[in-house]
Amino acid sequence: MSDFISSEFISAAIAFLLTISILSYLFGDNALFRSAVHIFVGVSAGYVAAVVWNQVLAPQLFRPIFEGAPNEKINASIVLFLAFLLMMKAIPPLSKFGTPSVAIMVGVGAAVAIGGAVTGTLFPQMMATINVFDLQAANERGVSSGIQFVEGGLMLFGTISTLVYFQFSAKRGDDGKTRHNPLIKLLVLIGKVFIAITFGVLFAGVFSAALTAFIERLDFLITFIAP
Amino acid sequence: METIKCPVCGEENDVSLSNCQYCHQPLRQSTSELNGIGTLIDSGQTPTIKKTSELESTLPAWLKNARQGDRDVAAPESPPSTPASPSPIEESALADAESSPLEDWLSGLDDDEDEDEEAADWLMNLQGGATPESEEAPANLPAADEPITAGDKPRPSDEEEVPIGTGELPSWVSDLQGKSSSEESESLPDLFVEKETPQEDIVDAGDAESGELPDWLASLSQSSDSPPAPAETPSFEPVSPLQADSDSPDIAADKPVPDWMAGLQDSSFTETAAEEPVPAPEIPVDDLPDWISGSGSAAPVATESLGTESDLPDWMTSDVKNVAEEPASESLPDWISGSNESSSAPVAEPTEAPLSTEDNLDDWMANLNAAEEESASAMTETPVDEEISAGGDLPDWMAELKPAEESSSAMEESPAEEEISAGGDLPDWMAELKSAEESASVEAESETPVEGDMPDWLSSLPSAEDGKEEASLLGDAFEEQASVQAFEAKVPSTEEAEKADVPDWLSQLEPSASDSLVEEKAEAPAFAESADTPDWLEEMPAIETSGVETAPSVDASDSFSAEPEADNDEIFGIEMPDWLSTLGPEDADDEESAEVVPAHAGGEVSGVELPSWVQAMRPVADVVPDSSRPSDEQVAGTGPLAGLSGVLPAATDLGQINSPKANAIKLRVSESQQSSAAMLEELLASESQPSSFRTSVKTSSVPIVRWLIAILLFLAVGSSLFIRSEMVPSPNIENMEVPEIRDVINNINEFPTEKSVLLIFDYEAGFSGEMKAVAAPLVEQLMSRGAKLVVISTSPTGPALAENFLDETQAKYDFQPGVNYRNLGYLPGGASGMLSFIANPRLAILAKEEGDSVWGVAPLENITRFADFGLVIILTNDVEKGRAWVEQGAAILNDADTPLLMAISAQAEPILYPYYLSGQVDGLVSGLLGGATYEQMLSQRGLGRKYWDSYSIGLLLAEILIVIGAMINFLAALRARQKRQKEEN
């Protein structure tokens, strides 16, 4: 009896009901599904608010103002002031006062994102594509040079063909129709194949993730029903 | 080359020529040439007197011939007409008379004898209706107050017992028949003042309207008044049906006389004499044309309004003042002054006032006046004094004639005469003839009313030509005095005649008429016998006196047609209309008539102007284009507007229209433009075409397919889970190259355990099941090595999921928070927060635990920077978060030689796997397959293996369903294609 009233059981029962409610969507939109969604949203929002207050606002904003050092107070006051201006965005007549805060956020965010993309994605990925043809390195790794060359060539070909596919510029003929170079047409066609494979991989990954989640939930239900 | 047809000779001429190269006549004749000014007469506008000498070219040939004949005759006979011993005054007066514009009214007519065709049609038409002579009104006379307009309809008199055939009479003639003389008395010119007769008491002044009768018509009334002219007055009496018939075209049916003219003659000759005289007509003079009403009223001139000098024109008033100072004969022509002198002595006292105006009179007029005065002196009583005194508006010559009229009025003053005199609008020449007729034929001149409807010259022509014939037509009735009296009784007052605008040329005729009366009645005015009298004037009375009494109208024609009868025959018989050829002075004496003409011919007849009523009948400005406008006006060669320029140029203009230049219709369009246009056209066409409505497959409310798939999945996955079978072997790690997993295992196995491991839980709750299966073997490996874990998340739910993950997957290790691991919680700011944390973890996370910073407790006490972590493992299902962590921290970690591992969801593998290939990520475990493989490699039995069968069955089922579904769709498409091909075939 005590097992039934344990917190684990209650939580598992709630999880079971909520899981059943979500799976009820199989029969279409229904009250159980909406109820589970609403509960999830509400609980998430409450939890997020609690987390934000406990882990962001209180320790990083208000506590430095009231308990922190002077420099922490100044920094916190500046942040608070910017936060106050940002809240003005909710009031249309005063929304312009929130512009500075938004500007700082967007500016900093863009700088961080662009900087990270350039230094963390573009250059490394280009170098990786180029280094595929580093047969010596491949030999060091114990990979055959031929295989590495083929693999590198395929990767390069796939990359180029995919990029060519996104090149929509073409010459316009006398009849007004766009005309592509036959080589470009071939690359575009190969790029389509690579893109299709990529989409297939993405779909497989999504399906695999979803299937794993479904298995986990179904396992939970089975475990809850038949532990 | 464009040509223009000469309106005279009909020859073709070049358009550029102004005159015909054959006949040298102007090719274009604008309306400005016609009216002398160029301004058009608008509807309702009172026409102004204008010089109409230009119209001489438009006169009919017969009229020109007549004028030419006059000149020819006048040349040799003019000397006898001059007095034998004219006094200096008379000489000067004669010279004035000769040079006077009064005699110039037909001066230019002889210049263009052959230009009948040049006359405008409208003017030609007037020959039959209004007689062309009526257009040649004296230029110096004022226009009638109410000019007759072409649009006026005949207004029948109220007293007309028998309606006059207005269709036969010109409307304007019928309108003017009923005019009362009394109403026009106020505006009568001065000349009527002198001719006023003591007939006021019998004048029906109320019937006449002032200013309606032209002068020449008024003069006719005077002339009918002065002598015993009862015979001609009845014809103007519209009261009687006979008189009405007189206006009808019944006269001389055997002649080619127009109907309306014939009717006039008939009625006047036959019926009026037979019937009892009718009381004074009440026909409003307004309805009568001026010249008719004037001739009808003849002698009786209204005098009431003439007495005031205020009504007199300036020139008249000044003359009146000079009367007492200067003898009246001074300004008169010699020939008139001679007669005036002879008659001035017996002038009665009542006539003093009008005589005082003789200063401005020409000599011959003065003579006339004297003659009239003499005749007036013979009369028993003449109330003329009042009338004359009132005749301020009378022209001088009328004033002079007044005594003569008085003398004639001594015989009887009939109201009829008064009526006739009301025709103040009669042309002067008409009035003169009238008076002449009256004086000449006192009895049985019932035809004169008819003649009063037509110009005197017309009425005189037949008399001269067919005197006998007319005499037979007249019959005895015209000779009866009773009819004369009856007619005279109808004559309205002379007030009407006083207002008449007598043309000068007609005024010259007037004395002649009065002279004839004087001679016939033994009361001949002195001027008639005077040597100063112009020849033509001397002939005028001779014509009438010598002629048959019934032809008083002959005088007028003789006045300007001095040719012998043979000439008249030639003229009128050939060129004149038939009806006109029948008219003429019956007994025109050749000599006298010949003498009359020189009077005109001798005078420098200047160009005449159109009478006002003729102007009014002209095309108005609304119809006729303004000739003053410079344009390529064309002269109408035919039609009613023949001779006029600027009319209907459409015919020639249409011929001159050039065909428009042929512009290329084809557009210059390139092929690309054409293809674009075609493409657009196809698009538009496809838009307009109704798309075939594809009948969607009716899906049932129950998602059977969805349920079927769900059932299959539930059964396949659930069954494997439920039976916990391991039908599907674990991933073959021996034959499978999974370097990323191997790298992860190696990095975990190689990292220094004294360093903390940073676990970044950046996945969502929905992927917790997968992430548990993926990351559980990895974390377990760490836990097995005793690593100190530091948990952080950029997702608010991440810290909770981290706690749940550790609790469920690593419960066997009994890790205590704050001892074995530290949950730093939520890292806000996204990529910025990541960068902040990577840059300075202590500044990014200000969390405190029990009042102290978390960075002072284990396992964070050694962490001052991001590279201090011995191993960084990113657990995420979000590609962006995983990429952001790699982008922001991979370089720092690589520099610090800190491995960066990733345990990601299967959905993020395609995007994040390149980072492993690029070396930015040192190891990677993705999806359930990676977790199961990781377990397999570590010989673990975890969630990977637990879910592997279900996962494998689920994937297989999914693959089967996908293949089945693809095949079904393929077959459906193939079937639809075959069906479409069958339909097409």
Image: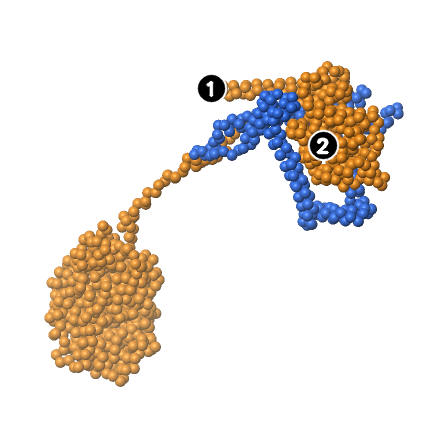
Chain colours: A blue, B orange
Where residue B417 sits, quadrant-wise, is bottom left
Q: Residue furthest right?
A: A2
Q: Residue furthest top?
A: B727
Where residue B959 sits, quadrant-wise, is top right
Q: CA distance from mark 1 to mark 2?
A: 73 Å
SS class of the residue under badge 1? Answer: loop
Q: Chain of mark 1?
A: B
At which x and y percent is residue B378? 21, 79
B791 vs B159, nearest the viewer: B791
Q: Which residue is mark 1?
A: B985
Q: Which residue is mark 2?
A: B897
Q: Residue at image x 23%, y 65%?
A: B53
Q: Residue at image x 41%, y 37%?
A: B670
Q: Chain of mark 2?
A: B
At which x and y percent is residue A30? 72, 29
Question: Which of the two discs, 1 and 2, labels the residue nearer the N terminus?
Answer: 2
Task: Determine crowd level at label 1: few under 14, some 14-19, many 20+ residues with C-alpha closer than 10 A.
Answer: few
In the drawing, does residue B865 fall left or right of residue B654? right
